[in-house]
Image: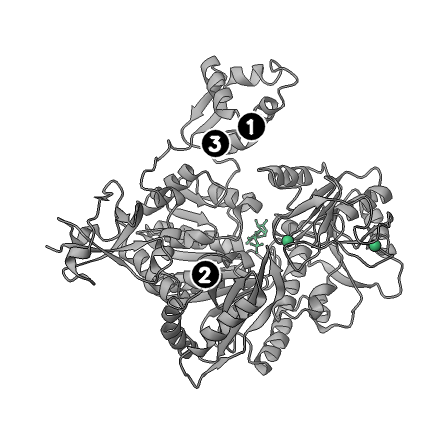
Amino acid sequence: MARFARIALDVPLPRLFDYRVTGISAEDIGRRVNVPFGKKSLVGLVLEITDTPDCAEEKLKTLKAIDSTLPPLPGDVLDLFRFCASYYHYPIGQVALSALPTALRRWKFETPNPVLQYALTAEGRQALPDTLPARAVARHRLAARLKTGSADSIELNRLCGDAPRVIQDWLEKGWAIIHEDAPAATPIIRPDLLKEQQTAVEAVKQALDGFSAFLLHGITGSGKTEVYLRLVEEALSQGRQALILVPEIGLTPQFTQRVAARFPETPISVLHSGLAEGERLLRWKQAAAGKAGIVLGTRLSVFTPMPGLGLIIVDEEHDASFSQQEGLRYSARDLAVFRARQRNIPVVLGSATPSLESWHNAETGRYIRLTLPDRATGASLPKLSLIDIRNQPLDEGLSQRAIQSIGETLSRREQALVFINRRGYAPVLHCPVCAWVAPCPRCSARLTLHRPRHRLRCHHCGHEERIPAACPACGNPDIRAIGQGTQRVEEALERHFPSARIIRADRDSTRRKGSWDTMQASIHSGEADLIVGTQLIAKGHDFPNLTLVIALDADGALFSLDFRAEERLFAQLMQVSGRAGRADKPGTVLIQTGFPDHPLFSNLVTHDFAGFAQAQLAMRKTGLLPPFSRQAVLRAEAHQLSAAMAWLARARKIIPESPDVEIFEPVPAPMLKKAGLERAQLWLQSTSRGSLQKALQEWVPQLHTLRAAGIRWHLDVDPVEN
Ligand code: ADP
Ligand code: ZN
Ligand code: ZN
């Protein structure tokens, strides 16, 4: 019997730690353990057991306890951790522990009671809301919600902090009941598939018994979701579990509801970071036990143990939120493909504007492309046109034509959306006398002016300060806000359309939980006429009465140093365009630009993603940029740039020789200073993924031994940020 366990621990060292233990067996691999570490105890995960420890036996400490209340993590999930650690060159223990639900990262955890569904009784319907005091706003909200149908405790807690107590009271009064099975809220509509949908579904169905990667390309509204639903249906009918990854669940409650409505009998584990810790654990356990037929979640759910996993879907596969930008920097989309290969099952990546990496994989035949060319409802595509803003007076960024079109739309009693990807009131506070601009003291960035709360705020580090009464440099009291953010555009629209009901949707206005849901509901029901929003709005759902979209201030991305900026801009504009004219009403999209001749726009107005992708890929090929090469970047930060640069220079010296790998000189980061630290980076690039990986494999362990006093560093493999 083995006497030593190799444990993954959440410490920044790329290795496992051996502990002495009696009575451990292969069945314990994948179990949580509690171990002494220095003066502390840590939670770890058994990854291996062995008879031959990696150091003298008497030096080893003894494991304190093994958690046998939970089933061990299955081998495929452990393999996924190993792959992730080796591909992203991140310590295995930190991979493993950051992939677990937070509750399990502590030794002691509690599993809460399952989520319950509540509904009003006939008596409750009578009594509510009339018997409530007028001032009990939150209770009115609960009553109003429950009058529309049953709701679960999570949703109710979101509406009212005191929901558990109020509901208990209503249960006791006989006004509410616990509803065991949530009735399907919406009747199940299961449309006959269109020809192209049929082809797509068939192609994947034929391939359910092995690995293949599909790229499902179809504009917004082309019926991709319907394809996913049919595939999930097929997987479920074969007793398999399906994993659906989406960018941000909080923004798309509709998607979740649609899946739930289609499979009323199937337990679904919805996993996202907005869940309370215990709730997340509960759902994770349901998935791990194979009870949840469907796991629907954001990027971290790619690690969910699913014994019956038989299908993976990644919706909006191009979306940047699949890439985690801190700690373990990984791409959930890429891991999804790895996981599908490992499990020998199909993976479907869907998007209206696929990432150029995926598009290239389809071009070269590594992925199978499936195309949905038209809108499934038969609605016509929105008509896109450009507004040339050169030599035009703008009113708070809005051209005459934009204002006029909004007016016409409103007078037809339809809705209009103004898209500007900048929150706050104005991006710059400027002194016309001495040219001072309000800087962030901690970042190489300007502070954004936020009007409602009268603050200057840094969007990079969160720093806040009061708006000065006069220029701090020269004392001039006449300092000015330059440029527009959502708040200022909202203000301008209020001025032009005083009777319109305006909703502003950005990260500030939707910070409170559930507020985006509420906003979407009021847009849907026609309680709003005009919407001003950032890209957040692009991820919302269909607004049938929305017929006009105006995009302001798109030009910044056209001349960015970041070679992915155009790709992101194209995707964003396509996505907001998709909001217009979904139902029987044709939509119009107006894009304001000072560069109407830019090639990006000619592809955009003809809805020609393929043409855009081809042009971009040609440029990438010439520059040997991804996907024609692979990149990794070592980033370092310190109080002084010189320290970060010097450390990178030393790191550079120990990169193993490789003819295939191009190694650049350390350079300051494009945004030099962030949150008080100065940053530098060192890029590596290769046309061969294998060569790059091989070099990193030798190099990174040595980096851990390089003296790094005062330096924070990390490696980013396949970076998506400059
Ligand atoms: P996407 O996911 O590509 O945005 P959806 O699957 O949401 O597209 O489809 C867009 C709209 O078209 C939805 O309202 C959906 O119910 C409808 N739809 C999808 N497929 C069909 C079909 N075969 N027949 C009729 N309507 C469909
Ligand atoms: Zn000044
Ligand atoms: Zn800052």
**In this figure, what is the number of numbered marks?**
3
Q: Which residue is mark 3?
A: 152
461 relative position to 606: left or right: left
Of labels 2 and 1, the one closer to you: 2
Q: CA distance from mark 2 to mark 1?
A: 36 Å
Which label is found at residue 160?
1
Amino acid type, callout 3? Asp
Along the viewing direction, whichever of 652 and 227 lies nearer the viewer = 652
Along the viewing direction, whichever of 453 and 537 lies nearer the viewer = 453
Q: Which residue is mark 2?
A: 330
Q: Where is residue 139, by image quadrant?
A: top right
Q: Residues within 10 Å of mark 2 (few under 14, many from 20)?
A: many
| SS at mark 1 in the image | loop
Amino acid type, callout 2? Tyr
Q: Where is residue 623, by image quadrant?
A: bottom right
Along the viewing direction, whichever of 713 and 67 lies nearer the viewer = 713
Which label is found at residue 92?
none
Q: Please state the horizontal and vertical placement of residue 214, each as a whole percent of the image.
A: 46, 65
Q: Earlier in the sequence, mark 3 or mark 2?
A: 3
Q: Earlier in the sequence, mark 2 or mark 1?
A: 1
Q: Earlier in the sequence, mark 3 or mark 1?
A: 3
Q: Please state the horizontal and vertical placement of residue 307, each as a whole percent of the image.
A: 30, 51
| SS at mark 3 in the image | strand
Is residue 359 visible to the viewer in this orientation of the structure? no
